[in-house]
């Protein structure tokens, strides 16, 4: 087994014939839920540590993935979607509603690629693979924060 391939393809979920990015983001959601189940009230901190520890190695694995697949930003690489989802959830307390919102908004921004995400895809190597998903995660994170402020103002509580 090639451990780098195992990681950059998101435990081989990147080989799904259709929607591999969505499947990779679903894996990230599952791992996020498990992280919060294990860490309890420290889940938010654990997610911050996860993002901090994974970002640089993910960029380096992206470099290896482009060599492995002999193409720029191969669709089999879903570690970027995983990282992007975890960025989406940074600093948000865990709830199923927030996690589902995060998944939805992350995939939305990752697919439509608003400015400057599309321009950032032009970087080569692992940085080019990861940066657009990281920024999509930032956009999704901010969107969730705005929604949560509005919901709080109207007394709506997420479950």
Image (spheres, rainbow, N blue to C red):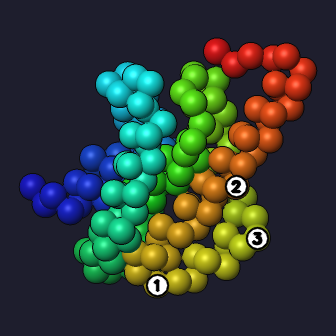
Q: Residues within 10 Å of mark 2 (few under 14, many from 20)?
A: many
Mark nearer the N terminus (2 vs 3):
3
- Residue drawn at x 85%, y 16% is 155
- The Cα atoms of the two marked residues, 2 and 3, are separated by 10 Å
Q: Residues within 10 Å of mark 1 (few under 14, many from 20)?
A: some
What x and y, as percent, mark residue 103? Answer: 59, 39
Residue 33 image offset from top left, x and y in percent: 43, 28
Q: Which residue is mark 3?
A: 115
Give the residue pinned by disc 2. 139
Characterize the local packing of mark 3: few (<14), some (14-19) or many (20 or more) Cα atoms within 10 angstroms.
few
Discs 2/1, front: 2
Q: Which residue is mark 1?
A: 124
Q: Position of residue 136 (x, y in %)?
A: 63, 58
Image coords of residue 132 (percent x, y):
58, 67
Circle 2 or circle 3, nearest the eye:
2
Q: Quadrant of the N terminus?
A: bottom left
**In the figure, is residue 154 to the left or right of 102?**
right
């Amino acid at each position: 087994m090639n451990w780098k391939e195992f990681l950059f393809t998101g435990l081989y979920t990147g080989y799904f014939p259709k929607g591999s990015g969505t499947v990779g983001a679903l894996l990230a959601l599952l791992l996020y839920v498990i992280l919060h189940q294990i860490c309890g009230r420290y889940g938010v901190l654990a997610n911050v540590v996860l993002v901090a520890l994974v970002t640089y190695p993910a960029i380096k694995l992206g470099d290896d993935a482009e060599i492995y697949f002999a193409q720029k930003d191969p669709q089999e690489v879903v570690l970027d979607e995983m990282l992007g989802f975890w960025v989406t959830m940074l600093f948000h307390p865990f709830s199923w509603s927030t996690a589902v919102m995060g998944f939805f908004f992350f995939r939305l921004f990752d697919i439509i690629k608003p400015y400057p995400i599309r321009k950032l895809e032009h970087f080569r190597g692992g940085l080019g693979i990861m940066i657009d998903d990281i920024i999509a995660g930032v956009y999704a994170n901010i969107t969730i924060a705005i929604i949560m402020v509005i919901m709080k103002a109207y007394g709506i509580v997420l479950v």
